[in-house]
Structure formats: structure tokens, C-alpha cells
């Protein structure tokens, strides 16, 4: 009991430390950003003349240290002062108190969270029951987690209000309480004392709460299924059954509480994710809660309100994290084991594989003498190649041919990412728009001119798509053949291949489907210039990466057949874009030709550009963000692991503490605040993608670290590692030999974090793009969704449907592939990793 109390007191102190650190980060962002928090509000000369008086009134002219001390004191006293943006000398007597704003908005957010919990609980139970009766629960919740909250909110906002049009006889507007105008309105929590007020507040809260509950329930279903499966195999369950207890009573009294442990261990991370999703959903539904107050305060540069709203949110996250630790202790968690992970990470298991006790043995049964270094593998492969060089030479020659066919694309990619190199378009490549052109015009007598082989633009485009994916299939077959050569011809006797891992991965149904979808989308992103139906310079996505505002090259001309005169005419690109916009008044739908004879597979956008091409370049942007996230988070995890293995437990405790602090930061609010407040230093969209990728990677690292930390602790504690150290071998070198399961888990949850970053990036751009100063344009899928939601149920509904389905498919595919890699890497010990990595995909 004493140890439990000490542990909870320690966790309470660390929770207070987290609140202080988070408040300090907000203070630093606001006061050390590009724009001064006061100067940002002085837009006119009249306002600038009184700026000094305003600064003095708010204490902004004092030393920064004095401001910080007063700020921290007022925050912890919950004395938030007055709003800055609403302050004006002419209405000084009507100053708005931040305390009143926060109190009012917090009530609406609390009501929303109440209904989120009420809706998430039955959805979670359904997911757990479905996982129990359809499999082992490994794939539970993938579909729910694959639907970002802001996307569901945009769909529900339209569907619920127009339910009468979609389902005859089921009109949402008169249900419970009449809402004749709109369901996107503030929650009337002030009227909860009356029956009508409760009914109206409940009705308005159900659609946004459902948008929050679906992805949250997906994660809870997986965590709870995993916990129940682990608890059912415990020895105390067998002992209870041996004493004659009924099976249902055993599950209710023993299995069910212990099954909640994975959820309790990540309660703080789930709360942080809920905060980010709440901000997005409240903005979509105009609920005027604390999340939308945070968003508005960032847009208006209202730094006092901003600091107060963030502070309340981080206090909520810290409180939930502490309650999760308390619940874990009440369920019998051992505080002495939890001390190894300062922030409640999963304790080190005592399970050791038999192969580890006896030393490493190859899959062929040949004793290697303990030498499994990468250098020995390389030396063995090199000797085998020298003995049988012909297969390797043939394979290398085929690879050289494949590279030369697309060498121009590699050069263009290098030019795009390396400053000072401008070789785009200099080196030719095979798969180019010029190989199979699809831009042409219809002839008066029938047929087409300007397209490949006189085909129609649609047929020519499909031919080019087929060639691109045929090339991608050739590369995949070349890689597969190389792996088979390595395994069957050049494999040394000491080879510990991944044959078993790949076999388990191929047997994973969800991973097969997810991997196929990821492969198709990856090829589409890499070959976007060739797959697009129009040139890249005719899309907003391409031109906006290096500028704040998108600009389409409208100087070119398009030849087309004038059906009225029967002659070939020419029109400027800008004219064709203006006249082919997709709105509720008229649109160019999927698979249709516009009036200028141009084919659009997905139709056109609100701006008149080709939707398919816009989505291709948006997919490229997401691929870039995901790559930055993986590199950043992976590097930090490997660095933390190396330091832990080299310097031991004190260093590990410090790293665990830092990871615990960063893991509780709500990603979406902090990312939006950082990018917006440092505008215009990160005004271009390419710079914003880089910054967002690094920040997402930094915030994803703690969850990745907490996930692989138990595996590292298990490996480091094996007897043969100590034996190797006793013989003078470096401990780090001995441990590295057993890191293959860690690598698989790291890749799996790195993909989860990358998928969450993609959804978060789309959510940030949906709010108004990544920077407040950037316009709403077709920069990537989030912007397309924002524009298209207004036409969801019109003839231009494709402008929303295709980006929405694309984002959901991409997110679901990444989740499924990651689940397969995770299960294949931990098949012999599925319960030895922390659950923190599962939260990484829930960022928006």
C-alpha cells in the first residue's frame, strides 16, 4: 500500500511537471514567434498609435522573465485575465474576461465529451465481441481508426441535416427538438435545467460526438481485445476456475478488469488525442466549445485566450493520465515494476526464448560460434557471389536497365530536394507524358488528333497508366527475384533470414489488402507527373508548393472542336479552367469530357482543375510528410535505444521521463499553434510540410519509444548478454544481434505514426491550411475536402467523395499493413509490447 501511494504521489508530481512544461512551451511559442503577440493585432495606423499603451496595460513591455513568472502564477491560479483581441480603448468598460469565456466554452466541450463516451462505449463493446467471435482480435478496430474524426464530422454535418433526402421519412430536424435552421450551432448547455434544453443539447451533440466516438472506439476495441486475450491466459484465471467459480463470474471479476490495463496505460495519450480531435470537430460543427475557442484565438492572435485554453486542455490530459495510473494500481499493478518505466510503461517480461539461453543458432542448424555480425553476413555473401557470379550479374544487369529507363525521373527528384541543382526535364525518361500523349482534340469527321495512335484521350491515358504499373510490377518482380537469389543461392550458413516473418506477413489477410493498396498509391505518388491527365503546371497543387498562393500556368492554349461551327478552335488554359468548374450549378463529373475535349477521370475541382491530377500531387505531399515523420521518429528512437543500451538504467529512466512528457502533448493544437504563430517564416507550403513532418515525428517518438522499450529491456536482461559482456565483448554489440523483433515493431508503429501524421496534416489544412495566412485552395486533400463539402449532395459531390474515400483508403491501408508487420514480428510474444504505439494513428 505504501509503495502504491508513493507511486501515485510521484505520478502526480510528474503530471504537474508536464503541465508546467506544456505551459512554458506555449509561452515560448507566443513570445518568441515571428510576430509579436501585440504587434500582430495592430493592423491600422490608429491601432498602432495606441499599441504602446496596450502593451503596458498587458505588461508586455516588462522583461520577459517577469512576464513568464506572472504568466505561470496566473495560469496555476486559473486567473486568465482579459482577452487581448477584444480590447479597445473605445470600449474599455466592456472588457471580456477570459475566465468567463473558458468556463462557458468548457461546459459545451464537457457535454460533447459526455456523449462521446456514451456513444464510444457500445461501439467498443461491439468491436470487442466481434473480435472475439471472428478471430483473435488482432484486426479489431482497423476500420474505425481509419476514419479521421474531422472527415466523419464533415460527412455527418451534411448527412444528419439532409437525412430526409437520403432516407425517406427520417428527418433529423424535428427529432427530439426542432432545429429548423442548422445543426451546426453552439451547444445550449445553459438550458440544461429544462427538458427542452436537455433534448436540444443532446440532439446537437450526437453528430459531433459520433464523429469523435468512431475512431476512439476503434482504438479502444483493439486495446481491450488485446487485454482480454492476455488476461484469459493468466494463471490466476485457471486457479479461479479450479476453485469452481462459474466461467461468467471469472470473466467478470478477473478477466474484464485486467483486460482494461492496456487502456489505462495509455489513458493520457488517448486524452491528448481526444483534445486534438475535439478542436477539429468543434470547428466543423461551430459548437463554440473550448476547442473552437483555441482555434479562434490562434486565428485572431488572442494570446491570452490562447494560453488559457491550452492550459485547461493540458490540465485535463494530465488529470486523465494520473487517473489511468491510479486505476492500474487498483487493478493490482506492481509499482516496483512500473518504476522501470517512470511514466508507467509496460514492465519487462521474464519470458526468455530458448534460443537466447543457448546462444544464436542459424535456421539451418549450423553453430555459428556466436558470431552473427553484419560483417560476417556480408563476407559470406561476397564469397558466394565470387563462386557463382552469373546469376548475380544477370540480376544486376536487369536492375541497371530498369534504372536507366527512368533515370530522368531520379534526376528530377534530386533537383526537387537538393538546393542549387536544376536539372528537371534535362534527362529524358521512358515513362513520360510525351511517350503516350493524351492531350488532343476531336476531328470534325470523327477520330482524334494529337493523341497516341489516334486513340481517345481516355484510352490514351489508360494505356499510359498500364505502362506505369507494368514498370512498377517489373521492379517488384526484380526485387523478389533478388531476394530469392539471396535466400537460395548466396545465403551463408549463418543466415538468420526473414522467411518466417514474410510467411506470417503473407498469411495476414488485412496486411495483404493493405499492402496492395499502399503499393498502388505509392506508385501513383512516385509517377504522379506521368499519371496525371494534365501537365503539372496546370494544377494548384504543383505550383503552390513554393508559394503561399497557388497559381496555375494559364498561358498555354488548348485546341478543341467547336461543335456549333464544326471547326477547330483554340482557347487559353485559364479560360478552360474557368469554364469547367464543378459547383452546384454545373459540373464535370467522373469519367466525363469537358467542353474542350479534355478527359477527367475524377471530374474537375471547384477551381476547374483536374481532380485526379490534384490528388496525385497531394498524395506526393503526404508521402513527403510521412517520410519526414519516419526519419525523425526513427532516428530519435534509435538514438534513445543506443543510449539506453550503452549507459544503462539511469539514462533509460531519464529518456522515459522525457518521452512521458512529450507523449502527452496534444499534437493537433500544438502543431497548428506553432505553424500559425511562426507565419510568415513558414509561409510556403513546402516549408510547412517540412516543419509539420518534423514536429509530428518529434511527438510520435515517445509512443514509439514506449512501445519498443519492453523489448529492449527483455533483450538487455538475458543471461547470455551478461555472459558475452563477461568475456570482454561490448554489451551494445551483443544486444544488437537480437534486435530483429524490435525492428519489425518499430517499422509497424512507425507506419501507424506516419498514417496519423497524414490524417493530421489533412485536418490542419482542412481548418484553413497549415498557415493562417494561406488561402483555401486545392493544395492537397484537406483543402479539397473543405471546398467539396459544400457540394456533397449536389452534382459536384465528386469533389468531396473522391478525396474523402482516398484519405480513408490510404489511412486504412497503412493501418492494416502496420498491423500485419506488428503481428508477424511479435508472433511468438504478442503481449510484450506497450500499447502506446496504437494511439499514434489517432491524431485528427
Image: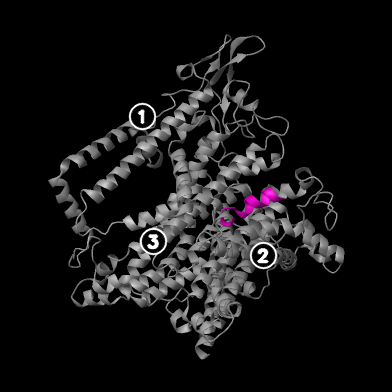
| Residue most extreme to the bottom | 2
Main secondary structure of the magenta stretch? helix
Judged left or right of residue 795, residue 736 is: left
Which residues make up the magenta segment? 144-156
Q: Is residue 26 visible?
A: no
Give the image location of residue 15, x and y in percent.
Answer: 55, 75
Q: How far apart, in angstroms, are the residues tagged by discs 1 and 3?
A: 39 Å
Disc 1 versus disc 2: nearer the observer: 2
Asked which secondary structure carries label 3, the reply is helix
Q: Quadrant of residue 192?
A: bottom right
Which image quarter holds the C terminus?
bottom right
Look at the picture and state if 92 lies above or below 268: above
Q: Kindly identify the residue that appears in the image at 56 percent across and 36 percent down.
A: 550
- Compare marks 1 and 2 and give the one earlier in the sequence: 2
For label 1, the residue is: 429
Q: Mark 1 or mark 3: name the one nearer the start of the chain.
A: 1
Q: Quadrant of residue 250?
A: bottom right
Is residue 325 among what the camera can see? Answer: yes
Instruction: Please say if the residues under marks 1 and 2 sit with CB atoms less than 8 Å apart.
Output: no
The spot of residue 599 in percent (x, y) is: 57, 26
Identify the mark at residue 122; answer none if there is no mark: 2
Does 98 sit above or below residue 341? Answer: above
Q: Secondary structure at mark 2?
A: helix
Left or right: residue 389 compared with residue 298: left
Q: What crowding class fits label 2: few (fewer than 14 Cα within 10 Å), some (14-19), or many (20 or more)?
A: few
Tell me if residue 77 is in the magenta stretch: no
**Residue indicated by mark 3:** 825
Which residue is at 38% across, 41% downward? 419
* SS state under label 1: loop
Amino acid at each position: 500500500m505504501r509503495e502504491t501511494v508513493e507511486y501515485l504521489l510521484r505520478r502526480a508530481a510528474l503530471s504537474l511537471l508536464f503541465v508546467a512544461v506544456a505551459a512554458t512551451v506555449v509561452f515560448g511559442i507566443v513570445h518568441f514567434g515571428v510576430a509579436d503577440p501585440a504587434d500582430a493585432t495592430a493592423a491600422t495606423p490608429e491601432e498602432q498609435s495606441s499599441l504602446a499603451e496596450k502593451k503596458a496595460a498587458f505588461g508586455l513591455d516588462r522583461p520577459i522573465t517577469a512576464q513568464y513568472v506572472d504568466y505561470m502564477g496566473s495560469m496555476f491560479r486559473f486567473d486568465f485575465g482579459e482577452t487581448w483581441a477584444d480590447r479597445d480603448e473605445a470600449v474599455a468598460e466592456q472588457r471580456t474576461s477570459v475566465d468567463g469565456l473558458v468556463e462557458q466554452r468548457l461546459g459545451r466541450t464537457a457535454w460533447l465529451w459526455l456523449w462521446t463516451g456514451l456513444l464510444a462505449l457500445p461501439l467498443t463493446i461491439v468491436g470487442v465481441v466481434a473480435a472475439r467471435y471472428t478471430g483473435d482480435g488482432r484486426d479489431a478496430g482497423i476500420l474505425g481508426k481509419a476514419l479521421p474524426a474531422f472527415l466523419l464530422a464533415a460527412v455527418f454535418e451534411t448527412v444528419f441535416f439532409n437525412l430526409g433526402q437520403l432516407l425517406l421519412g427520417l428527418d433529423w430536424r424535428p427529432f427530439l427538438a426542432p432545429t429548423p435552421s442548422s445543426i451546426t450551432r453552439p451547444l445550449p448547455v445553459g438550458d440544461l435545467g429544462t427538458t427542452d434544453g436537455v433534448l436540444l443539447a443532446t440532439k446537437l451533440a450526437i453528430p459531433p460526438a459520433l464523429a469523435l466516438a468512431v475512431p476512439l472506439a476503434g482504438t479502444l476495441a483493439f486495446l481491450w481485445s488485446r487485454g482480454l486475450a492476455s488476461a484469459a491466459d493468466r494463471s490466476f484465471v485457471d486457479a479461479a476456475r479450479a476453485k469452481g467459480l462459474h466461467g461468467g463470474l471469472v470473466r467478470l471479476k478477473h478477466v474484464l478488469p485486467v483486460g482494461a490495463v492496456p487502456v489505462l496505460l495509455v489513458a493520457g495519450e488517448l486524452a491528448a488525442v481526444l483534445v486534438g480531435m475535439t478542436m477539429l470537430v468543434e470547428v466543423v460543427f461551430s459548437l463554440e466549445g473550448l476547442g473552437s475557442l483555441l482555434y479562434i484565438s490562434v486565428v485572431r492572435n488572442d494570446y491570452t485566450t490562447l494560453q488559457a485554453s491550452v492550459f485547461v486542455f493540458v490540465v485535463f490530459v494530465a488529470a486523465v493520465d494520473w487517473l489511468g495510473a491510479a486505476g492500474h494500481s487498483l487493478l493490482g499493478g506492481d509499482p516496483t515494476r512500473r518504476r522501470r518505466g517512470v511514466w508507467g510503461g509496460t514492465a519487462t517480461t521474464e519470458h526468455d526464448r530458448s534460443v537466447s539461453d543457448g546462444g544464436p543458432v542459424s535456421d539451418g542448424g549450423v553453430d555459428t560460434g556466436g558470431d552473427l555480425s553484419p560483417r560476417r553476413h556480408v563476407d559470406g555473401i561476397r564469397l558466394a557471389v565470387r563462386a557463382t557470379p552469373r546469376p548475380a550479374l544477370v540480376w544486376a544487369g536487369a536492375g541497371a536497365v530498369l534504372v536507366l529507363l527512368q533515370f530522368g525521373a531520379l534526376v528530377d527528384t534530386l533537383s526537387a530536394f537538393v538546393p542549387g541543382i536544376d536539372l528537371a526535364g534535362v534527362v529524358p525518361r521512358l515513362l513520360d507524358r510525351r511517350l503516350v500523349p493524351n492531350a488532343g482534340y476531336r476531328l470534325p469527321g470523327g477520330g482524334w488528333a494529337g493523341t497516341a495512335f489516334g486513340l481517345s484521350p481516355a484510352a490514351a491515358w489508360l494505356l499510359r497508366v498500364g505502362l506505369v504499373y507494368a514498370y512498377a510490377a517489373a521492379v517488384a518482380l526484380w526485387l523478389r527475384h533478388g531476394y530469392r537469389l539471396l535466400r537460395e543461392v548466396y545465403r551463408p550458413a549463418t543466415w538468420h533470414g526473414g522467411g518466417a516473418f514474410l510467411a506470417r506477413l503473407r498469411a495476414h489477410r488485412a496486411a495483404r489488402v493493405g499492402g496492395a493498396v499502399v503499393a498502388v498509391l505509392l506508385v501513383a505518388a512516385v509517377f504522379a507527373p506521368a499519371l496525371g491527365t494534365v501537365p503539372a503546371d496546370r494544377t494548384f497543387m504543383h505550383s503552390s508548393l513554393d508559394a503561399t498562393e497557388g497559381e496555375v500556368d494559364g498561358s498555354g492554349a488548348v485546341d478543341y472542336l467547336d461543335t456549333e461551327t464544326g471547326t477547330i478552335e483554340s482557347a487559353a488554359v485559364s479560360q478552360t479552367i474557368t469554364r469547367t468548374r464543378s459547383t452546384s450549378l454545373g459540373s464535370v463529373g467522373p469519367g466525363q469530357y469537358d467542353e474542350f475535349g479534355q478527359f477527367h477521370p475524377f471530374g474537375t475541382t471547384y477551381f476547374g482543375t483536374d481532380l485526379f491530377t490534384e490528388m496525385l500531387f497531394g498524395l506526393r505531399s503526404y508521402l513527403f510528410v510521412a517520410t519526414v515523420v519516419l526519419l525523425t521518429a526513427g532516428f530519435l528512437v534509435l538514438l534513445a535505444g543506443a543510449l539506453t543500451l550503452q549507459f544503462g538504467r539511469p539514462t533509460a529512466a531519464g529518456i522515459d521521463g522525457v518521452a512521458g512528457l512529450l507523449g502527452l502533448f496534444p499534437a493537433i493544437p500544438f502543431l497548428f499553434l506553432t505553424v500559425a504563430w511562426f507565419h510568415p517564416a513558414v509561409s510556403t507550403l513546402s516549408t510547412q510540410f517540412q516543419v509539420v513532418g518534423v514536429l509530428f515525428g518529434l511527438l510520435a517518438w515517445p509512443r514509439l519509444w514506449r512501445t519498443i522499450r519492453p523489448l529492449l529491456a527483455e533483450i538487455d536482461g538475458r543471461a547470455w548478454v551478461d555472459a558475452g559482456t563477461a568475456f570482454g565483448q561490448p554489451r551494445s554489440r551483443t544486444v544488437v544481434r537480437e534486435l530483429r523483433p524490435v525492428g519489425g515493431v518499430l517499422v509497424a508503429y512507425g507506419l501507424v505514426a506516419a498514417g496519423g501524421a497524414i490524417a493530421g496534416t489533412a485536418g490542419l489544412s482542412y481548418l484553413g491550411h497549415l498557415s493562417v495566412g494561406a488561402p483555401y485552395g486545392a493544395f492537397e486533400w484537406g483543402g479539397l475536402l473543405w471546398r467539396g463539402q459544400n457540394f456533397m449532395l449536389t452534382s459536384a459531390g465528386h469533389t468531396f467523395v473522391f478525396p474523402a474515400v482516398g484519405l480513408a483508403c490510404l489511412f486504412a491501408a497503412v493501418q492494416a499493413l502496420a498491423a500485419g508487420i506488428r503481428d508477424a514480428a511479435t508472433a511468438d510474444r504478442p503481449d510484450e509490447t506497450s500499447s502506446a504505439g496504437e494511439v499514434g494513428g489517432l491524431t485528427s
